Image: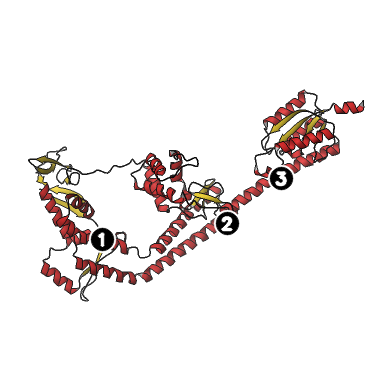
Amino acid sequence: MENQNFQTKKFFLYVRKSTDSEDRQIRSIDDQIAELKEFAEKENLTIAKIFIEKQTAKEPGRPIFNEMLANIEKNEIEGILAWHPDRLARNSVDGGKIIYLVDTGKIKSLKFPTFWFENTPQGKFMLQIAFGQSKYYIDNLSENVKRGLRQKLRQGEWPGLAPIGYLNDLRTHKIIEDPKRFRLVRKLFKFYSIGNYSLKDLQKLSSNFGLLTKRQKNLPVSIIQHILKNPIYYGVFKYKDELHQGNHKPMISKKLFEECQKIMADKSRPRKQKSVKKYAFRGLLKCAECGCSITSQRQKGHIYYNCTKKRVPCSQKYVREENLSEQISKILQKVSLPLAWTKKMIAELEKEKQENNQAMFSFAQNLKSQIRNCEKKLDKLLDAHLENVISQEEYTAKKQKILNQKIENQEKLKDFEQKGSSWLEPAKNFILSANQAQIIAKQGNLEEKREFLKKVGSNLVLMNQNIKYFPRGAWKILGNLPDLSAKRRRRRREAGILFVAKPPQNNKCLVWRGRPDLNRQSIP
């Protein structure tokens, strides 16, 4: 009779598998059910119902668990059958509920294949210890994860899935270049920085050169916008509003990233290039008297240019296209350089490069010193934060400022080391362009003359049928040279007077270099 009563005891079977990483080694749902059914058969237990839950127990509020407790309070159930106490609770609230139901007699017994429990003061004490250990495991695991994450951030490791264009290296736990997508994502930034492409245009371009989703579909516009706004592509990343310098290879420079942000902030529209088909000089000039545009029209087989006169009465007369073409040719000839001068000037540039090597070395050392100072400031700032000298908000703001300064100096140093005497190329290009000017003036078509004039001068206006302009940069020096005869030009060459071009960013476009009795002077 006693054996028969024992066999009629009903238990709820509860199995749970968390989706969190700490439970990856726990038996699967099917394994738990199989093991517990075998255990119930050995212990002569009847399983009234099986409750299956796939949710972490570190926080209260599990729906299946609460449903099981509600059924226990309503039905005549002996107790609960589970693999281990940590399957029932890993937080103090749920653990307290189980112990309370044991105290009130709602739960008469708890059965575990891996843990002994008896409904006695000693048994309940051991159950509380088991629940406490489970909670301690979760709390300790959380702290370990946070500590590991802080270490990863200090080392510059991205703590998540790699963004588009990078891959997660499971061996080094870093993000590395995606050989298929790295250069394609970089193209997005370069195209967008031009200013002529919208996000929709970038979507089409990315599709054309093969930058697609994992399912081989077009990238959504929102994803493209997120890419363009993500600072991780220039070497830093934000985690919880704090900026960290990554140890991965930057895809773009900080300067390019900021250009894209400015374009996005200004909500720029794609600018369509105006193609001049019928009238070569339309849209090139403005009226010097009233400021209106110069338009064009065809009359009796000739093209004429005149002021639109839309604002106020204007006295300016029309001018024929042939006249304008001749004026532009004279301007281009005035700023042109002969081939002999071009060769000598380029040779002088090479000499200038050698003289500047020492100055370049000093510049690089100065940048390295500034980078080291930034690193020292970051270390001091971190110490001040850890010692509670400054608040989290002050620490985050100052760190971002110093870190950006460090990155800017690193990029300057990187560009300097890669390019070195890169100023030589812009200077050579200017000299060669000046040599090309005389060819275009004599043989070039109207389109070439128009584009070269725009390169030479700005604020192009028409006054009394004559073109007036402000020369740009180094072209101002060439434009201000006296109109010498061929004989006088030859004498100057023999005297050794040459021009040496400097890059525009130095604010010194040309210098005179010639005979020993001539002082060298810089012309801004």
The reply to whether dot 1 and dot 3 touch (C-beta < 8 Å) is no
Quadrant where the image shows the C terminus: bottom left
Relative image position of residue 107 (x, y in whole percent): 80, 30
Amino acid type of the residue that numbered disc 3 sits on in the rendered structure: Tyr
- Left or right: where does residue 281 sit relative to residue 112? left
Q: Decide which of 447, 106 is in the foreground and name it.
A: 447
Q: Residues within 10 Å of mark 2 (few under 14, many from 20)?
A: few
Relative image position of residue 206 (x, y in whole percent): 41, 44
Answer whether residue 387 is visible to the viewer in this image. no
Amino acid type of the residue that numbered disc 1 sits on in the rendered structure: Phe
**In this rendering, the label closer to the viewer, 2 or 1:** 1
- Mark drawn on residue 339: none
Residue on which the image places disc 3: 137
- Left or right: where does residue 255 sit relative to residue 446? right
Residue lying at 67% horizontally and 30% vertically, measured from the top left: 63
Of labels 1 and 3, earlier in sequence is: 3
Q: Residues within 10 Å of mark 1 (few under 14, many from 20)?
A: many
- Mark drawn on residue 383: 2
Depicted 228 relative to depicted 441: above or below? above
Residue lying at 54% horizontally and 56% vertically, measured from the top left: 381
- Mark drawn on residue 430: 1
Distance (Cα) linking label 1 and label 3: 70 Å
Of labels 2 and 1, earlier in sequence is: 2
The reply to whether dot 2 and dot 3 touch (C-beta < 8 Å) is no
- Element type at mark 3: helix
Quadrant where the image shows the N terminus: top right
Amino acid type of the residue that numbered disc 2 sits on in the rendered structure: Asp
Q: Quadrant of residue 498?
A: bottom left
- Element type at mark 2: helix
